[in-house]
Image (cartoon, coloured by chain):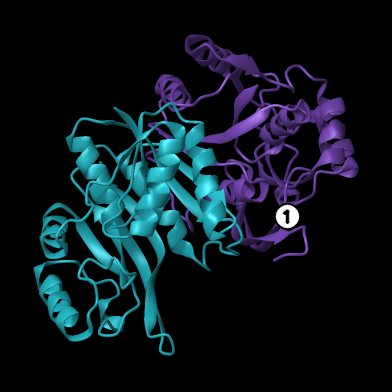
Chain colours: A purple, B cyan
Amino acid sequence: MRVAVLYSGGKDSNYALYWVLKQGFEVKYLVSMVSEREDSYMYHVPNIHLTELQAKAIGIPLIKGFTSGEKEKEVEDLKEVLEGLRIDGVVAGALASEYQKKRVDRVAGELGLESFAPAWHRDPVDYMREIIEIFDVVFVGVSAYGLDEKWLGRKVDEKALEELIKINKKYGIHVAGEGGEFETFVRDAPFFKARVVFDEVEKRWDECSYSGTLIVKRAHLEWKDAQK
Amino acid sequence: MRVAVLYSGGKDSNYALYWVLKQGFEVKYLVSMVSEREDSYMYHVPNIHLTELQAKAIGIPLIKGFTSGEKEKEVEDLKEVLEGLRIDGVVAGALASEYQKKRVDRVAGELGLESFAPAWHRDPVDYMREIIEIFDVVFVGVSAYGLDEKWLGRKVDEKALEELIKINKKYGIHVAGEGGEFETFVRDAPFFKARVVFDEVEKRWDECSYSGTLIVKRAHLEWKDAQK
């Protein structure tokens, strides 16, 4: 089974990749859709380039597809990217979002591809436990009541999970962040040949929207084998 | 004819792209091979990310393939990337390098693809005149006697070409930079939907090796249509 994995660099797409690699699927490409009109570059939204660092650490080619950002056009743009690949299936990190799942399933169906979502409808707490076990992963974005600036850059570990469970009870956030409550970044995984090391980070916090982002200004790869 | 264009962001790969678009070929992907072990990120070798900005301006998906950097492995890595694409041909910006041309031809042959090199064996001066006419292009690297720091960031125009011809006569450099005498960056072309604008640049000059690089620290896209 030759597949492309939709890849954003967070826990869900890395979990999806982890799962298909474990099944012995041949992962030909990682696919990342970025908004065309984003005025971003480096200092503005530097984290966008971190995905490339991860792809390099993994050693699988990364396809950056561009989309106008309009919701429906996005599906067509993704289809256009996948249509040119010699693959049998597409893999997404969808957890519980029907909207996201349906879109990918539709594109896959139209292209005659199988569609996989290894984490689909997993129990959030159970899923987070597995994430913690497999990955070195940190919070790089938070956007929910109960999650403050202190969460930015924090490691996703058992203690963080316990707090998330408490905040879930109090404010109703999704423990695995499926509602956009937080964004994560995977710095290391069993299939990474190098670790992503953050050299310089900056927390940006917006009190009005009660949300924030960890901006990674500099990062590098630390290769796991002896060779540099 | 569905093709992938080997793309580095300089004049040659943009010329190759220009040519195939003019032929009415369907360009499915731009393919950029980057060295895996380059310790680079942002501040270190920031220009590597400029290719993505160009791809976004062009609106064609960019595939970043990773290679260990060993010469022979590089060909295999490129083959691996191309092998997964539903294309009929591959396009390279090769001018006069037999080595480069042969490598791409071999990979294409093994994959049953046609191989195109639109600028192959063009007269250098004639070719440069066409480049000047079509592109907004600047020197971002120089590495040859006769080319000093002042060339970094300079526009490739008729006046620069005349000087290159003179330096060619004096020191024997290749007028189109085929021997690595200089590197260029295309900021605008007829097929760009946005211009690349440099916001902050820095010249790095090494007197020992008599070579230098224009580091683009910040850049953004300026869209040509009314919409932002």
Identify which residue, B82 or B191, lies in the foreground: B82
Residue that label 1 marks:
A195
- Viewed as shown, does residue B213 lie left or right of B168? right
Q: How many marks?
A: 1
Quadrant (top left/top right/bottom left/bottom right) for the N terminus of chain B: top left
- Viewed as shown, does residue A228 lie left or right of B87? right
Q: Is residue B86 above or below residue A8?
A: above
Quadrant (top left/top right/bottom left/bottom right) for the C terminus of chain B: top left
**Residue B21 sits in which quadrant?**
top left
Rendering coords of residue A210 (x, y %): 63, 42
**Residue B123 sits in which quadrant?**
bottom left
Residue drawn at x 57%, y 53% is: B73
Residue drawn at x 85%, y 42% is: A160
Q: Residues within 10 Å of mark 1 (few under 14, many from 20)?
A: many
Residue drawn at x 61%, y 45% is: A55
**Residue B199 sits in which quadrant?**
bottom left
- Viewed as shown, does residue B156 lie left or right of A120? left
Q: Is residue B225 above or below residue A140?
A: above
Q: Is residue B94 above or below residue A110?
A: below
Q: SS of the residue at dot 1?
A: strand
Residue A33 in sight from this viewpoint? no
Rendering coords of residue B227 (x, y %): 26, 37
Identify which residue, A103 or A110, lies in the foreground: A110
Q: Amino acid at mark 1?
A: Arg
Chain letter of disc 1? A
Rendering coords of residue B25 (x, y %): 25, 31
Residue A43 in sight from this viewpoint? yes
Identify which residue, A155 or B4, lies in the foreground: B4
Q: Is residue A98 above or below residue B140?
A: above
Rendering coords of residue A215 (x, y %): 60, 55
